[in-house]
Structures are given as C-alpha cells and as structure tokens.
Amino acid sequence: MSSPKNQPNIVIIGAGIGGVACASALAKFGIKAHIYEQTLQFSRVGAGIQMGPNATQVLHGLGLKDHLAQTAFQPKTNLNRVWNTGEVSNDYPLSEHVIAKYGSPFYALHRADLHEALTKLVPSEQIHLGKKLTALHQDDKGVELQFADGSKVHADAVIGADGVHSLTREILLGPEAPRFTGRIAYRTTYPSSRLKGVEIGDSRTKWWGPDRHIVIYYVTKKRDEIYFVTSQPEDATWTTKESWSSKGDLKTLQDAYAGFHPDVQAVIAACPEVHKWALFERDPLSTWVQGRVMLLGDACHPMTPYMAQGAAMALEDSVVLARCLDAHRGDDLNATFKLYEALRKPRTSEIQKASGANQWMQNKTNPDWVYGYNAWTVPLEMTP
Ligand SMILES: Cc1cc2nc3c(=O)[nH]c(=O)nc-3n(C[C@H](O)[C@H](O)[C@H](O)COP(=O)(O)OP(=O)(O)OC[C@H]3O[C@@H](n4cnc5c(N)ncnc54)[C@H](O)[C@@H]3O)c2cc1C
C-alpha cells in the first residue's frame, strides 16, 4: 500500500469503541485509516454504557448528536443510595445541569447501540473483519502486520486499539501481570416490561453496600430496556477472564444481594440471565509508543469500571490523536505519537487511579476535572 505525501497509511488494530471512534476522528481531518478486527461479526452483548459530558462532546463532534438525542436515555441525576435503607448520600443533577455547565449532555445507552452508531461513521470498505493480528515487525520504513489467516499488510503507522488483552501492547512491552481484585461484575440488559410495575426512577442509580454495589439505569430513551452492573467479592482464585461473553449464575447473584433494598432485589429477580466480568487492576504503562506503533483505549489504560470512564477515555484519545496527526502532518510520526502520549497519559493515569478507589460520586463530588475536558479544543502544547 502506498500513500500520498503527508498522508500516512494508518492501520488500526481492533474495531471496538476506540478503534472505530479513532477511524472516524481521523476522517474528520481527512486522514484515512483501515481497521483490522478479529471478530467475524459483532454481537449485541448485554451491557449498558454511561457517556459523561466529556464523552458526548466527542460523540457530538463525530456526528452523533441527533442520533443520541433521539435514542439514548438522559438520566435526570446521578443518584447514590445506601444499599439497605435507600438513604440518599448524593444526588448530582445531570440532564439540563451538565448541559449548562459543560456544554454537553450525559447519556446512558446500550453499548452495542453506541458501537453500531460509531461503526456506521466509518466506510465499510475500511473495516476488515476476521483479521486477527498475530505478529508485527517494524523498521525505519514501516510496519508489517501478520494475521491469523496468513495475510499480511504493510503500514506507515499502527494504532493498537485491541483492548484489554492487547497483543499490540504485548509485542511492544512484553506480557503484563494484571492483579485480580477478587471481585466480579455481573451485568445484563433486559426489557423493562419484566419489572412488572417496579419503578427504577429517572436517575442512574448506584446502591452502595459495605463491600459491594449495583448500578441501575435505562439504556433507551423509550425506557423499554434496563441495565444493571454490580461489583462484588467472589472467590479470589477464580480464573474467569475479562470477557463480554462469560455467563454468570443467577442464584449466586441473587444471594449476593439478598440484604439489599427491595427495589434492588426486584430488579435482580426480574432478570432472565447475567454475564460476568472479572475485575482486574493495572498500573499505568511506562510508555504507549514505540517507533511507528502506538496504543489507544483499553490497550494502554484499562481501568475498573467504577467511574464509567474507560470508553470515554478511548473516545478522548481518538480525537486528541487525530488532532495531533493533523497538526503535525509530514512531521516525524514517532514524535507526533509521543506528543499524543504526553498529552493523554497524565489524565488517563489519574482517572485509572480514581476509578480504582471506587468512591466516585458516593458523596458530594466536584466532577469538573473529568466532565469539563473537551478533546476537540484542549491545547495540543505541553504546559511546562
Ligand atoms: C462492566 C463494565 C462496564 C463499563 N461501563 C462503562 C461505562 O459506563 N462508560 C465507559 O466510558 N466505559 C465503561 N466501561 C469501559 C469500556 O467498556 C472500555 O473502556 C472500552 O470498551 C474500551 O474500548 P477499546 O476500543 O479500547 O477496547 P474494546 O472495546 O475491548 O475493543 C477492542 C477490539 O479489539 C479487537 N481485538 C483484540 N485483539 C485483536 C487482535 N489480535 N486482532 C484484531 N482485533 C483484535 C477485539 O475483538 C475488540 O473488538 C465498562 C467496562 C466494563 C467491563
């Protein structure tokens, strides 16, 4: 593959939220990227996703403003309640308040709906499915990528957006050793009609227990689909992976929340099936860039889901990277990637750390430093 001058031939590994957002953000600056994704077909895994104002800024800029307004649920507040009594510890206003304060809304939606909307922004001929990266080699002329089907591709630069189990990261930095937190996240989406009249309210609600919690919200504007996600201790020797497809046991889940408020138990009782995700922790990486290869999203800053900011960080990464590549056309790619890393790592490391603490919004919280970030306008120069 050849590329015109100042127009690097860019390959993205992984068509998750970060990969497709990145291709779409690059296109906004006239830079074309091809995505190589191992999956043959995307499936609708049962999961919701919260998009704070910093994330919706990105999504609006990519062209999804009307789509989100027509389909996504806009919670009234970020409501935090004590697990058994239901006492309110914090009720942070969202809807109109965050629009006025940060210039963009807070949405909750189905993860697959978000992924589908982002994927539609990228021309289908730029997304190559069934392409599992197995190796990459770089020299001063470019990068050669090999896939499990035996095919090879050559690129000027590679963006590893291949998620929490990133092979790109492993090739750059060697195998990692994540720490199992001893906790599992159970999650599911199901039709709200199954609740048979139980009201979950207009908020995105987190019920805080002494050693476990559950977050509940609608994922559609019509409120016809509900989502919950938990975090609870489970056998520390347990070896299930961070996986969107591992099934969970309903009885284990019901027992774990037996003492919770009746509203919580009603939501769990109405759920037909659950999936589970093992919660691991990782420290920030030493670097995200090596030569012509760099990392984005969970590949470089995976985090516990407690602040609902993992995908938001991948979205921010995408726009900042695209702006860096646009502003430094024709410059040394490694230097541009290093600038992107320097601009993004302090923020993602801070959020990784704060997310791990699992205190976000439990009590009065000022979210300005998280919600007030606009990836489209943040200065691209390093502050001394
Ligand atoms: C329970 C839970 C709840 C969450 N809730 C929220 C939330 O409310 N808000 C929020 O902002 N974030 C949330 N997150 C975090 C969010 O899901 C992730 O941060 C986000 O999905 C990361 O996107 P990504 O594109 O980096 O990785 P992924 O979405 O994991 O995509 C990686 C892609 O790379 C592909 N791939 C992997 N290896 C290869 C290979 N070798 N070759 C080719 N392709 C490959 C994969 O198939 C996949 O499609 C949550 C996470 C969890 C676990």
Image (cartoon, rainbow, N blue to C red):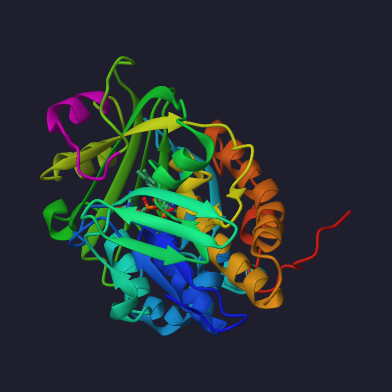
Instruction: Point out residue 367 in the picture as x, y percentages from the top left corner.
Output: 64, 53
Q: Is residue 222 left or right of residue 215?
A: left
Is residue 179 visible in the rendered image? The answer is: yes
The quadrant in which residue 324 appears is bottom right
Q: Is residue 189 left or right of residue 232?
A: left
Is residue 358 visible in the rendered image? The answer is: no
Q: Residue at x 42, y 30 (%)?
A: 280
Q: Is residue 304 above or below residue 219?
A: above
Instruction: Point out residue 18 in the picture as x, y percentages from the top left corner.
Output: 44, 60
Give, as a single range, the part of the protein colored magenta: 243-257
Instruction: Point out residue 43 in the picture as x, y percentages from the top left corner.
Output: 18, 59
Does the magenta segment cover residue 302? Answer: no
Q: Residue at x 18, y 41 (%)?
A: 274
Q: Residue at x 59, y 71 (%)?
A: 322
Q: Residue at x 27, y 19 (%)?
A: 238
Instruction: Point out residue 35 in the picture as x, y percentages from the top left corner.
Output: 37, 67
Most foreground residue, 188 or 64: 64
Most foreground residue, 138 or 236: 138
- Count the marks: 0
Q: In this view, which residue lies farthest toward the right?
A: 384
Q: Is residue 354 left or right of residue 187?
A: right
Most foreground residue, 40 or 5: 5
